[in-house]
Image: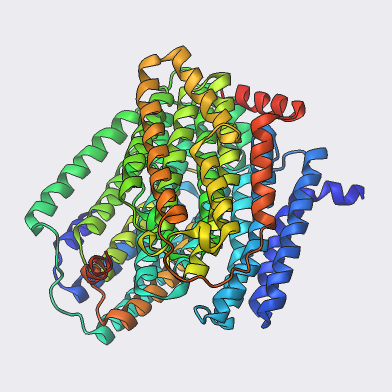
Amino acid sequence: MNMLMAHAANLVLLIPLFAAGVFAILPWYRWAARLNVAASLLTFAASLLLLFQRPAPTPFIQIDDLNIVFVVLNTFVALTTSLFSASYIAHEVEIGRLTPRYLRFYHAMFQFMMFGMDLALVANNIGLMWVAIELATLTTILMVGIYRTPEAIEAAWKYFILGSVGIALALFGTILVYTAARPVIGAGLPAMAWTELIRRVADFDPALLNLAFVFLLLGYGTKVGLVPLHAWLPDAHAEGPTPISAVLSGLLLNVALYAVLRFKMLLAGNPHTLAAGPLMVAMGLVSLIFAALMLYRRRDIKRLFAYSSIEHMGIIAFAFGMGGPLANFAGLLHMTMHSLTKSAIFFSVGHVAQVKGTQKLADMGGLIVTHPVLASTLVISVAAIAGLPPSGIFMSEFLVVSSTFARAPLLAIPLVVGLLIAIGALFLRLGSVVFGEPRGSTAPDRASYLPFLAHLSLVIVAGFYLPTPIVTWFQNVARLLG
Amino acid sequence: MLVSFLMLYQDRMLALINVFALHAMLLGLSVGWQAYVQDAPQLYVTAVIAILFKAVIIPAALRRMVEQLNIHREIETVGGIGLTMLAGIGLMALSTVVMLRVTAAADPLAREDLAFALSIVLLGLLMMVSRRNAVSQVIGFMSLENGLVLAATGAKGMPLVVEISVAFSVLIAFIVIGIFLFRIRERFDTIEIGALDRVREGRR
């Protein structure tokens, strides 16, 4: 048992990697789908072990207060997504959109992507983190293009071009950070380790750090989907398989944001650098308002929720940009809640699109008549993402708004306006899908509701009551973020 | 550096690929020189990878692809070549000024290296933006990556992890690109990004 504990961090990485290898050669997709769930379950268990005992940081891997939240969240959503994906994929095979050969590829890539994301989160080395994020990006590109339709390939190509430019900029930023660290720490591995960087950052050259941060914010900001750089995101979400949309929205955006946060912490540690906050606040606000307005003109249901992801990433970037214990706390809470809710929405939307046989909003309607259960899951999850009271999102948005009112009332006005616009748009669209004239197929659904229920019950419970250990833990992290 | 400008100037596919090969060759040589100056044997590996892989194998593969696809004709650009050149000169001046100012404290060799690297990265970006053709966008991307390798090797004693990963990522990136190019050709019989846009308009 002790040995298991000691290697939990490695297990989180090794299980997905091993599973990816197995799936690449395993020819039976039904088994692969089940094993996929099993592998995700094991990874989740390993990440829970990390909660109880943290290994000491090595030159490559570290576990601290900040990333443990994300590791647990990541593995949990991976587990539920693999459950959802098993039922989703079975349907896709039936209607012949995917062949067993592609499925082998799909499952292998799924685990490989998990490996990339977990590695990015636990990496203690800025270079290693960059490689891991690149790995996760490349696998998602391949997954987005998996249907091989012209639209899917266009989406994947766009994602590839924008994503790789972003990643290239981020690498340049990473190199600049190293250049700044070298004169102080000395050449070699320690100058790239987070633990060392944070300790010694006060002596770095502030001008180099500033420049590096601009590159990193632009680079990883592309992956987060902040507005001037968001163009890949809706296409990639709309054209890929729905489980991938769920993982993209719920996890990959978080991982990229986590990278930005790490570097922001670094910048905050040096008194002479420019404040990173205003940059993030500006990008966050622009994203929020732009995405909220764009929500009105969407005709594709997955595209609609992709824009809603941009909107929420904007809110989160805004919150972290404001800084201070309260806003950071709200940002962390919002990140967690958004991951859970958005993936729940994609679970629900995936089944809706499957029973209706289309993703066009205009071709679906009257869901409440044809599929009452699915319709209610959709309504509940949209209400949750829009931030209506009983959900955890309401609480985090409320915290963001109130902390902004307390410190910069003028900024709170556009924030609230953006939120309201988004709520209006979401309900307008939801109304036509759920309550309008019944349109489209009425085939019975065979959805699996377990993943959906798991996520939403967490979100709603969090809206009423957050256990004290979690609160103190988030508070610690918020203080760390400065 | 000059070669990057040459690339911007090229209007024919095969010529563009040849210039890219030259670019990569120069990169390899400069990395080799860095290895000598810094006395860091592992950098020789990077240099060899750059020369073999980027200056020989990739251009050969691209050339074959261009011949197969029969796209020797002129490359369409957004905006004229003269305009692009002007923009390129502007970017170069900008990056030099920024880098030299920011890194005033660092040693002169590293400074100039970083300034060069940044301007190559920016020129690569410009090239990706200003070309409509998938193959030349890919070349733009790879010259951007060349700039990154230059920056990484210029930073003294940067651990090997990164160099390997850069080479590795180029490899993967190329596989991905290859797959995409082939799929794109299967579906549209052309690799103009404009064709992709038409598909898009049709859908809306």
Query: Is the C terminus of chain A in the top left, top right, bottom left or bottom right quadrant?
Result: top right
Quarter of the image holding residue A468? top right
Residue visible at 36% across and 40% down in the picture: A292
Residue visible at 34% across and 44% down in the picture: B113
A425 vs B181, nearest the viewer: A425
A92 vs B117, nearest the viewer: A92
Farthest residue to the right: give it: A1
Instruction: Say if B164 sits above or below A401 in the image.
Output: below
Q: Position of residue A166 (x, y in %)?
A: 39, 50
Residue visible at 68% across and 44% down in the picture: A457
- Count of marks, rendered view: 0
A2 vs A39, nearest the viewer: A39
Q: Position of residue B30 (x, y in %)?
A: 36, 56
Q: Position of residue A254 (x, y in %)?
A: 54, 44
Task: Judge whether residue B165 can be spotted in this image.
Answer: no
Q: Position of residue A180 (x, y in %)?
A: 47, 33
Farthest residue to the top: give it: A406
Instruction: Say if A106 sits above or below A80 in the image.
Output: below
A282 vs A311, nearest the viewer: A311
Task: Judge whether residue A209 can be spotted in this image.
Answer: yes
Quarter of the image holding residue B51? bottom left
On screen, residue B85 versus residue A21, left or right, reads left
Quarter of the image holding residue A232? bottom left
Q: How is the image coloured?
A: rainbow
